[in-house]
Amino acid sequence: MGEFPSQRGRQKALDGASQTQETRKILRPKAPGERLDRYLAVSLGLSRTSVQQRLLSSAVQIKGILGTPAASYRLRGGEEIEIDLSVRTSALEPPLPAPESIPLVILHEDDDLLLIDKPWDLVVHPAFGHRTGTLVNALLGYLPRLPGAHTIRPGIVHRLDRETSGLLIVAKTEAARASLLDQFASRTVEKGYEAVVRGAFPRTPVSCARNVGRDPRNRRKMAALSLGGRSALTEFSLMKQHRSAALVQCRPQTGRMHQIRVHLAFLGHSVVGDPLYGGNRQPESSRLLLHARSLAFVHPRSGQRVRFESPLPKEFFTWLERNDAQRP
């Protein structure tokens, strides 16, 4: 696949981040307009709460600005931001994850990355209520040294809901992590999902561009909003119509929390087995029938565009066969 770029190029991280010491990071954001706390959380694999606590502890400084910037500070692009990662916020942040012996399904591995086939009901990284038994714990058991070791998300460059199965990329080096984070941020990663949804789905492709934000009536949920929230776009196409459900291809063009599930529910075709967005009816399946089927991206080392796929789990076929066998 060729050689790594020069040491100078290797030190380039997301939007020009570089490491000065083990516990300090300097970042130089390129794109303007994003909130400081969100940018730092995504760039460093930290929770928003952890970033905000570090801001309150004066652990974040922007060159040329006196005092500690606010979490809501809007980046202009080109700033030099220094963050002290030695400041821990243990009262509000899970402890750093430990290695655990948990089986992994690895679809591809090279010197730069892993492609994991994540099972449903597996949390990606530690959080309150899920301090152990996560994918990150399993990864550390397999590869003790992952980029971002000072965070609760080492190696993680994107996430899947606990209830969603399928493909997830893991970076094995800082250079790979920086490249992949940049590709996700610039929306050049092609993500393909498949879902079993309720009802007769339209035969022609459908797009949903409703903003996605917190549900004002239930803060545990997200909602499709006409005002507020963040812009979101998902493209859907029918793969096969069944008796009272359909197999649908989903292509999210943005990466909002629960985006596919929210948009499908808004369109009146909630995902089978969805406990949050399926309405008041009892889930017809023991699991959410949503699967991250494919990923296409530029390989961090070779510069070539690559594509990976995860087979659709057998539970999808079993449920659809049982649905077709039922009487109208």
Image (cartoon, helix red, strand yellow):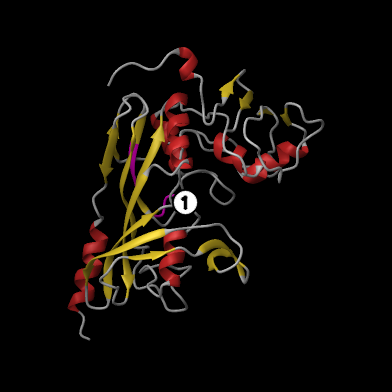
Residue sticking out furthest to the bottom: 328
Residue sticking out furthest to the top: 7
Q: Which residues are magenta?
A: 115-122
The amino acid sitting under disc 1 is Gly
The answer to which of 139 and 328 lies nearer the viewer is 328
Residue drawn at point x = 27 percent, y = 41 percent:
308
Residue 118 in the magenta stretch? The answer is yes
Q: Position of residue 223 (x, y in %)?
A: 53, 66
Residue drawn at point x = 68 percent, y = 43 percent:
74
**Dot 1 surroundings within 10 Å: few (below 14), some, or many (20 or more)?**
some
**Does the rendering let one see residue 293?**
yes
- For label 1, the residue is 255
Residue 23 in the magenta stretch? The answer is no
Whether 21 is drawn above or below 224: the answer is above
Residue sticking out furthest to the right: 67
Q: Position of residue 119 (x, y in %)?
A: 35, 50
Say what secondary structure mark 1 lies in: loop
Residue 16 horizontal side relative to residue 169, left or right:
right
Residue 282 horizontal side relative to residue 3, left or right:
right
- The quarter of the picture where the C terminus appears is bottom left
Residue drawn at point x = 26 percent, y = 55 percent:
313
Residue 284 horizontal side relative to residue 33, left or right:
left
**Does the rendering let one see residue 119?**
no
Q: Position of residue 275 (x, y in %)?
A: 45, 68
The answer to which of 49 and 184 lies nearer the viewer is 184
Residue drawn at point x = 28 percent, y = 77 percent:
200
Whether 179 is drawn above or below 253: the answer is above
The answer to which of 15 and 20 lies nearer the viewer is 15
